[in-house]
Amino acid sequence: MRKTALFLTLLLAACTEKTPAIQMRFVDDLDGSPVANARVSYCGAAWEGTLTGHGGKTHTLFHIQAATDARGELNLPPREFDSRPFGASTNYEHAAMLIVKSGYETYRLLNCCSALGELAAVSSWGYNGTTIRLKRSPPGASDAAGRSAADLNGCGQSSAVPVDPRNVAPSSQAPPHPVQAPGDPEGQHRRAAQPATSGR
């Protein structure tokens, strides 16, 4: 009986993973001032793989919502999640983060530093220790916070267009954690650090 209990404990432990501890900072693109009370949605998802491709089933591994503090900083402690919802057939989407603040363009960051399908795509975060410069919304633009409420609840799944990769910079508040992307690093950043757009 004890051997069975031990086996089950080890099996459950093998299926449990943690999100990384995340430390980031968000500032105004024009004057560098902290962007406080920005709403952040950080999530990871998996899909069932089969011999012929996608099995059709998807699963949200984690969906963490938080807000930046008065210094524009975001601190997310690690959180456990079930890493094998489909057993050995589990494949992983890149973790995503959506940042929403009234008066600013909505940004979506995609964890492009690990291969799609691998556990590292959701158990690591390539933007840890970086400062993200948020661009202000153009005059007369509709409220980004209201427009993106559904995106926050939907785990950050939104359409997006590329932006200048220079909007991602090492943070002076935390040790820099360089993003190492194979091939074309600037192209990876352009695809990963994106202001989200909405057709609504």
Image (cartoon, grey):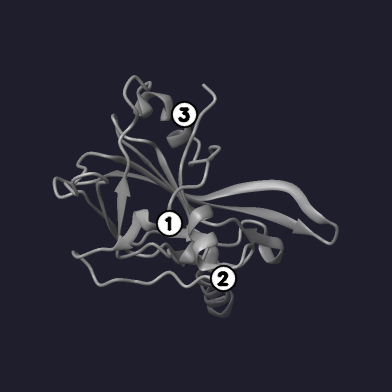
Please name the amino acid that badge 1 sits on. Pro
Q: Which of marks 3 and 1 is in front?
A: 1
- Disc 1 secondary structure class: helix
- Few, some or many C-alpha atoms within 10 Å of disc 3 (few <14, some 14-19, many ≥20)? few
- Few, some or many C-alpha atoms within 10 Å of disc 2 (few <14, some 14-19, many ≥20)? few
Q: Nearer the viewer, mark 2 or mark 3?
A: 3
Alpha carbon distance from label 2 to label 1: 46 Å
Q: Which residue is drawn at 42% across and 25% down?
A: 147
Does label 3 or label 1 sit earlier along the sequence? Answer: 3
Residue 96 visible in image: no
Q: Which mark is residue 8?
A: 2
Residue 21 position, x and y percent, is: 33, 64
Q: Which of marks 2 and 1 is in front?
A: 1
Residue position marked by numbered label 1 in the rendering: 165
- Disc 3 secondary structure class: helix
Residue position marked by numbered label 3 in the rendering: 150
In the displayed structure, does residue 185 sit left or right of residue 126? right
Q: Looking at the rendering, in which quadrant would you find the N terminus?
A: bottom right
Please name the amino acid that badge 3 sits on. Ala
